[in-house]
């Protein structure tokens, strides 16, 4: 039985727990990429994507004075696939034109820190939309996290594990839970952006005249 949720408020933990679990991309639709050859094999499909879900992960720093060397994993997603890039200099060089391309929209949550890390790597992010600030139409003026956004828009429980989020993202062989977590964090923002656009709920500060054609055609 679903817990009642008041309007104009963040969903309660009890309400979210009562919702069906988020359906992530199938494992064969999640690509882990760590070579330039792999990058080149997906270059054409990435270049035609007008909207990309975006996130990054870094190996956590626990000790005082320890310098953050991330990002160690960069996630991009379309409606069909998630691409998990294990960072190297050549992979950053491959991704740089995508992140700097003003005609490709990158959407995600909590991207301020990502922008800082990317700038340190010589990459300036363009056409990036911070989705956490797009929920004013719900009466929510403070930033909304991805878990609450998925509950508000789709009535699903989007799992977030602290043990996975703080795991070692620099490891050579990512675990299956890491791969699934990373893919979901890039895939869900694409769905959220599309739904906000479909409902006409994107903030007026985001010009949407050129975005109308970006929704998937023939969406049922």
Image (cartoon, rainbow, N blue to C red):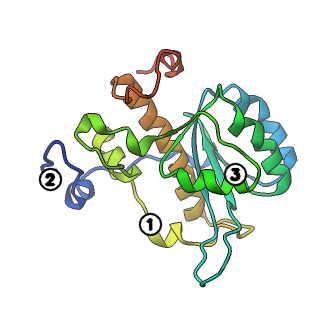
Q: Which residue is most to the bottom?
A: 63
Q: Earlier in the sequence, mark 2 or mark 3?
A: 2
Question: In the image, residue 108 lies at what x, y percent?
Answer: 51, 44
Left or right of 88, for residue 3 = left
Question: In the image, residue 103 lies at what x, y percent?
Answer: 65, 25
Which residue was labeled with disc 1? 161
Q: Earlier in the sequence, mark 2 or mark 1?
A: 2
Q: Which mark is residue 35?
A: none
Q: Residue at x 64, y 70 (%)?
A: 59
Label 3, label 1: how far apart the Cα atoms are: 28 Å
Q: Which mark is residue 119?
A: 3
Badge 1: how crowded within 10 Å, few (<14), some, or many (20+)?
Answer: few
Which residue was labeled with disc 2? 3
Q: Residue at x 86, y 47 (%)?
A: 36
Left or right of 89, for residue 179 = left
Q: Which secondary structure lies at badge 2? A: loop
Q: Earlier in the sequence, mark 3 or mark 1?
A: 3
Label 2, label 1: how far apart the Cα atoms are: 22 Å
Q: Which secondary structure lies at badge 3? A: helix
Label 2, label 3: how far apart the Cα atoms are: 43 Å
Question: In the image, residue 198 lies at what x, y percent?
Answer: 38, 23
């Amino acid at each position: 039985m679903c817990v009642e949720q008041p309007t104009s408020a963040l969903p309660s933990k009890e309400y979210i727990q009562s919702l069906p679990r988020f359906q992530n991309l199938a494992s064969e639709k999640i690509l882990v990429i760590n070579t330039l050859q792999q990058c080149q094999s997906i270059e054409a499909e990435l270049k035609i994507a007008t909207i990309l879900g975006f996130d990054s992960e870094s190996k956590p720093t626990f000790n005082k004075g320890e310098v953050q060397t991330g990002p160690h994993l960069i996630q991009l997603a379309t409606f069909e696939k998630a691409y998990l890039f294990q960072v190297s200099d050549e992979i950053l060089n491959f991704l740089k034109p995508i992140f700097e391309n003003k005609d490709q929209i990158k959407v995600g949550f909590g991207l301020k820190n990502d922008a800082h890390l990317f700038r340190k790597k010589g990459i300036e992010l363009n056409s990036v939309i911070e989705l956490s600030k797009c929920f004013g139409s719900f009466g929510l003026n403070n930033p909304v996290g991805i878990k609450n956004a998925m509950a508000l828009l789709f009535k699903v429980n989007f799992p977030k594990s602290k043990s996975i989020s703080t795991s070692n993202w620099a490891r050579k062989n990512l675990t299956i839970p890491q791969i699934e977590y990373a893919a979901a964090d890039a895939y869900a923002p694409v769905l959220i952006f599309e739904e906000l656009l479909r409902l006409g709920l994107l903030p007026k500060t985001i010009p949407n005249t050129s975005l109308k054609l970006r929704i998937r055609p023939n969406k049922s």
